Image (cartoon, coloured by chain):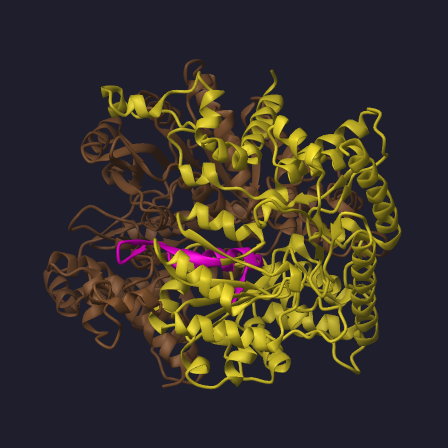
Chain colours: A yellow, B brown
Amino acid sequence: MSLLKLISFASRRVFTDLAVRPQRAALGFSGFLGLRERNTNLPNYRTMATTNTLSSGVKLSVENMNQNVVKLQYDVRGPVVLRAGDIEQELKKGVQKPFKRVIRANIGDAHAMGQQPITFIRQVLSMVANPELIESSNMPKDAKDRARDILCGMLGYSAGSYTMSCGVELIRKHVAKFIEARDGIKSDYNNVCLITGATTGIKMILEMICGELGGKTSAVMVPIPQYPLYSATLVEYGLGQVGYFLDEDHNWGLSLEELERAYSEGSQCSAIRAIVIINPGNPTGQVLTRKNIEDVIKFAYKHKLLLLADEVYQHNVYAEGCKFFSFKKVMTEMGPPYSTEQELASFMSISKGYMGECGLRGGWMELLNFDPIVQAHLYKALSAILCPTSLGQAAVDCVAKPPKEGDPSYELWLTEKNCVLGSLKERSVMIYETFKNMKGFKCNVVQGAMYAFPRIELPQKAIEAAKAARRPPDVFYAYRLLEETGICVVPGSGFGQRPNTYHFRTTILPQPEMLTEMLNIFQKFHQKFCDEYA
Amino acid sequence: MSLLKLISFASRRVFTDLAVRPQRAALGFSGFLGLRERNTNLPNYRTMATTNTLSSGVKLSVENMNQNVVKLQYDVRGPVVLRAGDIEQELKKGVQKPFKRVIRANIGDAHAMGQQPITFIRQVLSMVANPELIESSNMPKDAKDRARDILCGMLGYSAGSYTMSCGVELIRKHVAKFIEARDGIKSDYNNVCLITGATTGIKMILEMICGELGGKTSAVMVPIPQYPLYSATLVEYGLGQVGYFLDEDHNWGLSLEELERAYSEGSQCSAIRAIVIINPGNPTGQVLTRKNIEDVIKFAYKHKLLLLADEVYQHNVYAEGCKFFSFKKVMTEMGPPYSTEQELASFMSISKGYMGECGLRGGWMELLNFDPIVQAHLYKALSAILCPTSLGQAAVDCVAKPPKEGDPSYELWLTEKNCVLGSLKERSVMIYETFKNMKGFKCNVVQGAMYAFPRIELPQKAIEAAKAARRPPDVFYAYRLLEETGICVVPGSGFGQRPNTYHFRTTILPQPEMLTEMLNIFQKFHQKFCDEYA
C-alpha cells in the first residue's frame, strides 16, 4: 500500500472510529478500545509499561500518545467532509456519480463558495505586501495611505518583521476605535489583542483555566448545540464540558433556568470556571436579545464565571427586529458590579461578516476586568508564539477602520458590503422557507450567522439501518445525502443535540443559483430517503 | 493608576519575578510565592478551596490560573526586551540618555534590522492578495504565473478561503520537490505539513507526547543552551526537560557521551520520549558534522526517541568547511533500521534563511516513519485550528520553488539572495573577531544561524552587585548594557548555560554600519563595566 493510501486509510479509520464512538460508548466500548481492536500489530503500551523495555523508550503509537489528542473530534472537517474530498477526486478521475459536483455546505468558507473579496481590503494587502505598488500602481489614495500607515507601524517598514505579540499598536488602536463606535463605550487598546483568527484567542483563554480547583477538574459551560472548536479544545486541554441546552422550540433561545440546571448538575463533579456564549449562534443562527444577554451576565457574575463571548458573526444579522448587542456594551451599561468586576473575553474574526477572509487568519479579542497580573501572564504566553500574521493584521485594520464617507474607496466598499450582506440575508430566508416546509423537517428562522440547523425526523427503519451500519442516524443520513447528491453537510452529532433528535448544519453560503439547485436536490433526496425507509 | 500603567506595571512585575526566579529558587522561594508576597489583596485559592465559597466559583487569579502558564518563560521577548521598548518610548518623549537609539540585537528579526525583502516573494504575494494585479501590473511573467498557480490551488481562486489543514496541495508538492533537490532523496508530500511558522509545528509535535508513561512524566531532551521556545513549551505542556550540554570548548559540539549521560540521569525520574536538535544552532551558531548527526540518530534509535530536527537555519551556513546536512538525508543514507524505523519531524521556516519573512508566519514540517494512525490523529488535531495562513503559504511556495535559471526573475532573485547571505557571513565574522579579542570574552566561530553566544567573565564584585540587585549576574549585565548603551541582547540564562558561567545572545542582524557602531560601543561599555567592578 502506498504511503498516501496508508495515511488516507489511517485517517478514515481514525475518523470512522470517532464517528461511531457515540454508538460504541453506548455499547460499552471506548473509541480507544475501538482503535485497539483493529490494530493488534501496534505495541501494547500498557503491557510495555510493566516491563523493563520501557526504560529504552517506546515508539510513538496511538496507545502511548497524548490520549486527549486521540479523543479530540472536529466534525466541521471530519469524516463526512473527508469523504466529500474523496468524491471530488473520484469525479475528477471520471468515476460516474448521480451528480456532477460536490456542494460544500459544511464550513463557513465564503470565498470558497464564490463570494468575492472586498476590493479595499485586497488593495491595501497587496500594497503592504509589496510597498513598491504604493507609488507605481493606480490604486485609490485612501488605500495607498492606509498601506503606508500600516507599514509605518511595522518595524523596518516591512510585513516581514515580527510585530508585537499582541499585534501592531496602530491596528490595536483602530480596533479599539471600532469597538467604541459599535458600542458607544470607551475601549482601551491595551485590552485588545490581535490573534491568528478567533481560534487562537479562544484556545489561549481556555488554556488559562486548565487545571484543578478544590480537587475538581476545571470545566466550561458550552451551549448544545455548539461550535466544535469548543468541545475539541476542552478535550485537548483536559477540561470538563458542561453543556447547557439551547431551546429549539423557542428559536434556539437561552433560558436562565437551563443555565442554572446545567450549572447545578455540572458543578457536582467539576469546578466550572467559564461559560461560552456564541452570538449570533453557530450552528443555530439565533441572535440573543438584550434581556438574554443581561441574564447571562447576571448568571456569570453570580457564579464567578469567566465569560467567553464568541461574537465573530456580529456583522451577520438578517432577521427583522434582531439586533446585535455586544456583551461588553450590555455589561457596561448594566453598571457596577457587572461593569467593573465581571471578567469578559470577546472574540472577533475577519473570517466571517461581510469579509469572509478565512484564509488570512486574522482576528482580535478584547479582555475586560481581567486581573492585570493574569493578563500579563497571558500576554507573556502569547509572546512565545511570537506574533499573529502581519498580513492578517493588515486585513484586520481594514475591517476595524473601513473607508468612511467621502473617501475615494467608500462607495465601492459600501456597495460590496451591502451586496454580500443583502445576498446572505436572502439566502438565509431561502433556506429557512425551504426546510420549514419540508415534511419531517423543523427549521428555525436563521436570524444571523451563516448556518441553518434543521431538525429531521427519521423513519424508524432508517434508524435501524443506521445502527446496522454502526453509524449514528444523523451521520448515516449525512453520508447518504453526500453519496447520492454530492451535498456535504455536517451531522448534528458533531455539534451536540438532545438525545434521540437528529439535525444537520448547512451553511447559507452557496451562491443563490447553486443554493436553489441544492435545495431542490435536497428535497428530492429526502423524499426518496423517507420512502425507502417508510 | 491608568489601565495601561496597571498592565504595564503587572507585566514588569511578572517578568521581574521571572527574571529573579533562579535566585529565589536558590533562596528557597518559588516564583509563585514571590508573586504572592506582593499580592495580599488577591483571593487565596488554597484557603478558598477548603471553604464553601468555592462552589460559587472564583475570579481568575494568578493563584488559580493554569500554573504552567505562570511558570512559562520566553526571554527572547522577556523583561530586558520589554525594558528596551520602554526606553524607546522615553527617547521619543525626549528623555535624555547616553545614546540616541536602541539597537535590537535580541531577536532574529531581519527585516526589522533593515534587511530588504526578496522582490520575487513580495511580487507573488501582492498578486495572490490582489489577483487583479496579475493582468494590470507590469510584474515579471514568472511571478504572474506563480501567483496564478497558487490561486488555482485555493478554493474559489481566493486567498480568503480556508486551505486544507496541512496546506495547499500544490505548495506541499513544491516543498517535497525542494526537499528532494536538497537531499537527493525522495519526499512524499503527504508527509509535508505547512504550518504557521515552525513554532506551531514544534508545539503540535510536542503536544503529541504529553502525558505519562509507566507512571513517569514524559520528558524531552533539549540542548543547553537551547532556543527558549522549547523550554517554554515543555513547561506549558507539563512535559519534563532533560538538558544535554553542548561543548563550548569544542565550538558548541555535541558529544555522544554527554547525550548518554543526560539520558541516563534524566530517565531516573522521567520517561524520555523525544530529543530536540537545533542545526545550525540557536543560540550557539554551530553547524553539525555528518558524523555528529549519525551519532544522534543512532542514539535516538537506541532509546526509541522521537527526533525533532529544528533546521530553520538551513540556508544560514557561513564558515569554511561547514555544510548543512539534513537529518532526513543522513538518516536515509544510513539505511535500515534507521531509514525505515526512526521517527523524525523536521522543521523549516520562512522567517530565517535569506528571506527573513518572520511576520508572514510560514513554514513546514516533514514527518518520517510516523505510525500512520498517529499521523492521522495529528492531522485531525490540526484540522481543529483550520489552516495555516494562506499568504504565509504563498510565501512558502516561493521559497520552496524559487525562480530557476532562465526565468525572468532569476537574476534578481539570485543577486538578492547572495547579497543577504554574503552580508550575513561578513557580519558573522565581524562579531566573532571582535568578541574573541575582547578581554574576558570567549566567543566561538559563528558557523551558521544568526547569533553569537559569547561567554563573559564577570568580576566578582559585579556578581555581588547583581546579587544585591536580586538579578542573575548575566541579567544584571544585560540590563546595564541596555541602560547605558541602548544595545539590547538576551541574557544567557534565558537559553540555559552551565552553572556559574555567563553568556548573552546577540544576533548578527544589525546592518554592517550599525553593527560596527554596536561593537565599538560594546567594547567601551565592557571596559568601563570591568573597571567599575575591578
Q: Is residue B23 above or below residue B482?
A: above
Which corner quadrant holds the N terminus of chain B? bottom left
Q: Residue furthest top?
A: B336
- Image coordinates for residue A100, horizontal then vertical, percent: 86, 34
Q: Position of residue B21 (x, y in %)?
A: 21, 60
Looking at the rendered structure, the number of numbered marks drawn on it comes to 0
Can you say whether A269 is above or below B365 in the image? below
Q: Residue at x 41, y 37 (%)?
A: A67
**Of B189 and B474, which appears nearest the observer?**
B189
Q: Quadrant of residue B518?
A: bottom left
Q: Is residue A220 within the magenta segment? A: yes
Residue B490 position within the rendered picture, expressed as x and y whole percent measured from the top left: 33, 58
- Going 34% across and 44% down the picture, which residue do you hit? B284
In this orientation, which residue lies closer to the viewer: A457 or B6? A457
Check if residue B67 falls in the magenta segment: no
- Residue B126 on image: x %, y %: 72, 55
Residue B494 visible in the picture: yes
Tell me if residue B26 comes above or below residue B140 in the rendering: below
Give the quarter of the figure containing the C terminus of chain B.
bottom left
Toward the viewer: B148 or B121?
B148
Query: Magenta residues?
Result: A193-221
Looking at the image, residue B3 sits to the left or right of residue A357; the answer is: left
Classify residue B121 as left or right of residue B43: right
Query: Is residue B105 shown to the viewer in this render?
Result: no
Is residue B225 shown left or right of residue A517? Answer: left
